[in-house]
Image (cartoon, rainbow, N blue to C red):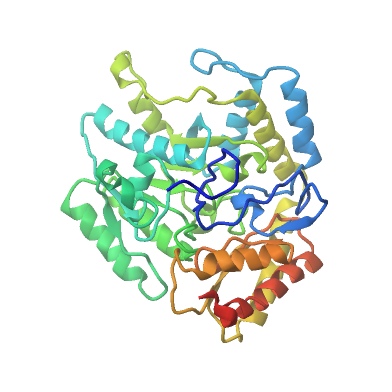
């Protein structure tokens, strides 16, 4: 069947072109707004897939990108280096939890996690005690490469690619009241066979449904991993750079992972860049006169100088501007507005983690493929708000500079969303 969609040759991500409306053309952006060629303004309440932290086209990051583009655009990173990559790596070692001493560059959250899994497996092989078992949380989503899909929950995201995926041990999600069950399961798994690594999204799962879990549980997972010599991988692709209320989510548990994955907010959302940080022990396992122990991973644009310059500008903003104060203000604004919706009988499971707010619209057909999801997005965009629900789960994750009136408009749209259901949106 030939597509009846637009004449554009572009194939958009996570888009069913047979049913989706035509994509919205965006000509420019500023602060919390996307601007169409017709000068219509759309409030970006999800930070354009969770990447924009300080606002669109932040002048300090724009200036850094412009200056670097005029100096050095790209150079192979195997056998060469450059100042933006060196400065950013050193800054990240200083900012992240203690014990993370090495920085490996890549270009997306998926590849940052893929690198982490390869680092873990390479570590065990290179020290002469090979382990291959990975443990991951129920409902997890870690990306769309083969390794990250394998670590993610099986379902609609990866069903077609099942023959390519490897099996992992799946840990029950530590819902409130069920934390000990998940911890006991982790302990039992680690006792039953050698485990290479546990991978988690700290404190909140993203695409898995914005599911919140406790920092105390993460701290206990760290202790279990230590007892059984299991590497802990923290996927902070989404949770990093202030989203959970602290610079990195792991800080709230008082722990340092063995491997840490960062992307999205790393450049303030301006350019694609990712890093995988690891302990010196993991680096040392790959450091050898035996070239077969080399860490074999790369991409053509590894540590692109322009992207690294954007990343360094982001770090400087964090160091020199009151970003955490903005984060705390947004956290409080979200909390007050969520409370107002808590009594609405159209919503359930109202929850918050730092600057991230989420709630579920009560419908008969729930889940990621719930028909109400696309209708809700169309409804929100019609009101000048970019919200992209995960099925019947509506979440708000705006840039930190959003003001109270702008956030009020977002919540007014959410409050009105029940009209979608009442008019047949299920």
Furthest-right residue in this view:
39
Residue found farthest to the left: 192
Q: In this view, does 102 lie to the left or right of 324?
A: left
Q: Against 180, is 5 above or below?
A: above
Q: Which is more toward the observer, 195 or 57? A: 57
Asked whether the viewer can see residue 388, the reply is yes
- Total count of labels: 0
Q: Where is residue 338 in the image (x, y as percent from the top left)?
A: 64, 75
Decide if residue 414 is on the left or right side of residue 282: right
Report which quarter residue 312 is drawn in.
top right
Residue at 27% of width from left, 50% of height from top? 168
Q: Quadrant of residue 311?
A: top right
70 shown above or below 111: above
Q: Can residue 392 be seen in this view?
A: no
8 or 79, nearer to the observer: 8
What residue is shown at x 46% (from left), y 52% (from top)? 255
Q: In this view of the protein, which residue sits in the foreground, 414 or 212?
A: 414
User: Which residue is at 43% across, 41% downward?
Assistant: 113
Q: Position of residue 102 (x, y in %)?
A: 48, 31
Q: Where's residue 323, x and y in %?
A: 73, 51
Could you tell me residue 393's position as x and y percent?
A: 52, 68
């Amino acid at each position: 069947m030939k597509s009846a969609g637009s004449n554009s040759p572009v194939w958009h991500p996570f888009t069913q072109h047979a049913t989706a409306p035509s994509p919205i053309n965006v000509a420019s952006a500023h602060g919390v707004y996307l601007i169409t060629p017709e000068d219509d303004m759309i409030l970006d309440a999800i930070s354009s897939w969770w990447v924009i932290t300080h606002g669109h086209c932040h002048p300090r990051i724009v200036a850094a990108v412009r200056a670097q583009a005029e100096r050095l655009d790209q150079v192979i990173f195997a056998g060469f280096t450059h100042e933006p990559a060196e400065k950013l790596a050193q800054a990240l070692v200083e900012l992240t939890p203690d014990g993370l001493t090495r920085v490996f560059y890549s270009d997306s959250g998926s590849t940052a996690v893929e690198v982490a899994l390869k680092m873990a497996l390479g570590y065990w092989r290179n020290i002469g005690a090979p382990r291959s078992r990975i443990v991951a949380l129920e409902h997890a989503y870690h990306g769309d490469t083969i390794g990250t899909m394998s670590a993610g929950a099986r379902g609609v995201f990866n069903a077609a690619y099942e023959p390519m995926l490897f099996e992992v041990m799946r840990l029950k999600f530590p819902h409130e009241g069920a934390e000990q069950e998940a911890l006991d399961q982790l302990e039992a798994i680690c006792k039953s066979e050698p485990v290479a690594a546990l991978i988690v999204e700290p404190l909140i799962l993203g695409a898995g449904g914005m599911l919140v879990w406790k920092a105390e549980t993460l701290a206990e997972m760290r202790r279990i991993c230590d007892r059984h010599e299991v590497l802990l991988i923290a996927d902070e692709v989404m949770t990093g750079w202030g989203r959970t209320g602290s610079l990195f989510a792991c800080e709230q548990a008082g722990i340092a992972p063995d491997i840490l994955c960062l992307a999205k907010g790393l450049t303030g959302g301006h350019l694609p860049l990712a890093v995988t940080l690891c302990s010196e022990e993991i680096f040392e396992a790959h450091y050898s006169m035996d070239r077969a122990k080399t860490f074999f991973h790369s991409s053509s644009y590894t540590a692109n100088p322009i992207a690294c310059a954007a990343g360094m500008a982001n770090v400087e903003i964090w160091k020199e501007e009151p970003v955490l104060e903005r984060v705390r203000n947004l956290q409080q604004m979200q909390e007050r507005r969520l409370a107002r919706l808590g009594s609405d009988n159209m919503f359930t499971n109202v929850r918050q983690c730092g600057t991230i707010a989420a709630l579920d619209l009560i419908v008969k057909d729930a889940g990621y493929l719930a028909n109400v999801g696309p209708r809700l997005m169309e409804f929100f965009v019609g009101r000048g708000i970019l919200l992209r629900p995960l099925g019947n789960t509506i979440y708000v994750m705006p840039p930190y500079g959003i003001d109270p009136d702008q956030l009020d408009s977002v919540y007014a749209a959410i409050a009105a969303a029940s009209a979608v259901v009442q008019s047949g949106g299920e």
